[in-house]
Amino acid sequence: RDGLPGLAGRDGNNGEKGDKGEPGTPGEQGIQGPPGPRSGGALYTRWGRTTCPGTPGTELVYFGLAGSTDNNHPGGGANYLCLPTTPQYLVSGLPAAYSYLYG
């Protein structure tokens, strides 16, 4: 065309990417946070027991009853459920669809 040529890209450069700069220096280290929860060791389930052995370092973590479905009834859950020691029973009749739970 008859007009003057325009500038070569933004700020007058041709838009090519330059070399990557060197990484900056690390900042100051922050203060140490609070200690996390105690971890490690092993957890043993003592089925049918009401007490833990008096071995140093052992403690009772959970108390209750474990419940699940019968292996002969299809449709139940795969995991154990933690049941309360004082259950609340269903007062009105059985619902239209239900599953068996044994504890």
Image (cartoon, rainbow, N blue to C red):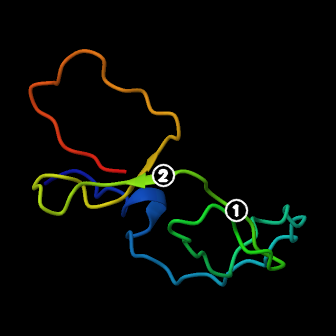
Q: Residues at badges 1 and 2 in contact (C-beta under 8 Å)?
A: no
The residue lying at 76 percent from left, 73 percent from top is 58
**Quadrant hosting residue 13:** bottom left
Q: Earlier in the sequence, mark 1 or mark 2?
A: 1
Few, some or many C-alpha atoms within 10 Å of disc 1 (few <14, some 14-19, many ≥20)?
A: few
The image shows residue 100 at horizontal and vertical percentages of 21, 44
Residue visible at 30% across and 17% down? Answer: 91
Q: Nearer the viewer, residue 77 or 83?
A: 83
Name the mark on residue 81: none
Count the marks.
2
Q: Quadrant of the N terminus?
A: bottom left
* Residue lying farthest to the right in this orientation: 31
Q: Secondary structure at mark 2?
A: strand
The amino acid on which the numbered mark 2 sits, given as a three-letter code, is: Leu
* Residue name at image x 70 percent, y 69 percent: 52
* 58 to the left or right of 77: right
Q: Position of residue 42 (x, y in %)?
A: 62, 80
Give whichever of 77, 4 is nearer the camera: 77
Q: Secondary structure at mark 1?
A: loop
- CA separation in Å, label 1 and label 2: 14 Å
* Relative side of 37 to 70, left or right: right
Residue 29 location (% of width, % of height): 86, 71
- Would you name the residue on which mark 1 appears? 60
Task: Give the class, few, some or many, for how many residues have Cα within 10 Å of label 2's Cα (few <14, many ≥20).
Answer: some
Q: Is residue 39 above or below residue 1?
A: below
Residue in view at x 10 percent, y 32 percent: 97
Q: Which residue is mark 2?
A: 65
State the image coordinates of residue 35 (x, y, percent, origin top left): 83, 66
Amino acid identity at mark 1? Leu
* Mark closer to the observer (1, 2): 2
